[in-house]
Amino acid sequence: MCDQDQVDDMLSYARRQEILSRRQFGALSVGAGLVAMLPRAANAVDVKESEVEIKTPDGTADAYFVHPTAGTHAGVLVWADAFGLRPSFKQMAKRLAESGYSVLVPNPFYRGGKANPPPPGANPADPAVRASMQANMRALNADTHVTDAKAFIPWLDAQASVSKTRKIGTTGYCMGGPMTMRTAATFPNRIGAGASFHGGGLVSDQPNSPHLLVPQMKASYLFAIAENDDMRQPDAKDKLREAFAAAKLPAEIEVYAGAMHGWCPPDSQVYNQTQAEKAWSRMLELFKKSLA
């Protein structure tokens, strides 16, 4: 999960490297940074977007759903990071849908109300902003990950645009990384691929550590690891490799050189376009192979 040290890393790295450029970025979206214009998918298809609500054991989750306007397609469940559902995640979901997927992005913090990311200009280093983020994250745990997955995956399967004969994929960013693994373990016969981008808390010494769930999965995986996350926990990648090898499941596990925790969303202050595009292309290749 995103901890205080990781948020501090994002802020200090952005200031140090001065990676933000007015030509590359648009208006402020959330306190984490600016929204970059993502390249449109090659051979992009027309898509339909909608705001939806999904009943769960804990209430009603607001979510964004986007899918090609024609045909049925593999579903993808996207777990957002600590800033929650916001324009940058809708942008990424739309881009993925344009590549031929039916994509759902729920508000992970719906228990506290509808998606309400920090306002433009909000600084994650501000004590009030940080306290709000930490309170949101404390409301989630291994049990809520599973109960939410049990609501969101059947919802996807009930949609006319989702193919019932193709596997479902799941992606997660930061705190969303462990959520993908719990989803894959909860629905082993439905989840065919998972991708974790700068995921936090994938490996721990706790009995509910996500990496211990690998024997319950049938999904192929991509783990795109931030360089500073690897420096903080250098053995995590090895334990992931060992777990997937023992389960005889394919897993691409790579530390992305120069990429800091949070580098993939285009509104991040540490957004690294080159490495984000590499991770995106690896995800598309994984989905092409595994979501048949």
Image (spheres, rainbow, N blue to C red):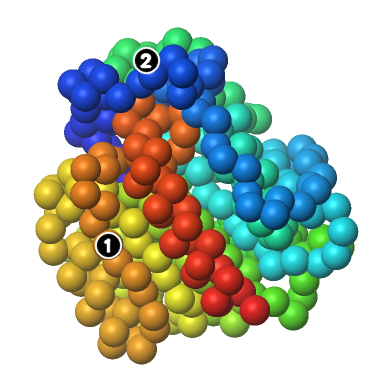
Q: Please tell me which residue is depicted at 36% across the width and 89% down the height of the picture.
A: 248
* Residue 155 x %, y %: 74, 59
- Mark 1 vs 2, N-terminal side: 2
- Residue behind mark 2: 123
Which circle, 1 or 2, is nearer the viewer? 1
Residue at 48% over, 77% down: 219
Q: Residues within 10 Å of mark 2 (few under 14, many from 20)?
A: some
Q: Quadrant of residue 273?
A: top left
In the picture of the structure, the residue carrying the numbered disc 1 is 254
Going 67% across and 44% down the picture, which residue do you hit? 94
Q: Is residue 35 visible?
A: yes
Q: Position of residue 210 (x, y in %)?
A: 35, 65
Badge 2 element:
loop
Marks 1/2 in contact by CB < 8 Å: the verdict is no
- Amino acid bearing label 2: Asn
Quarter of the picture holding the C terminus:
bottom right
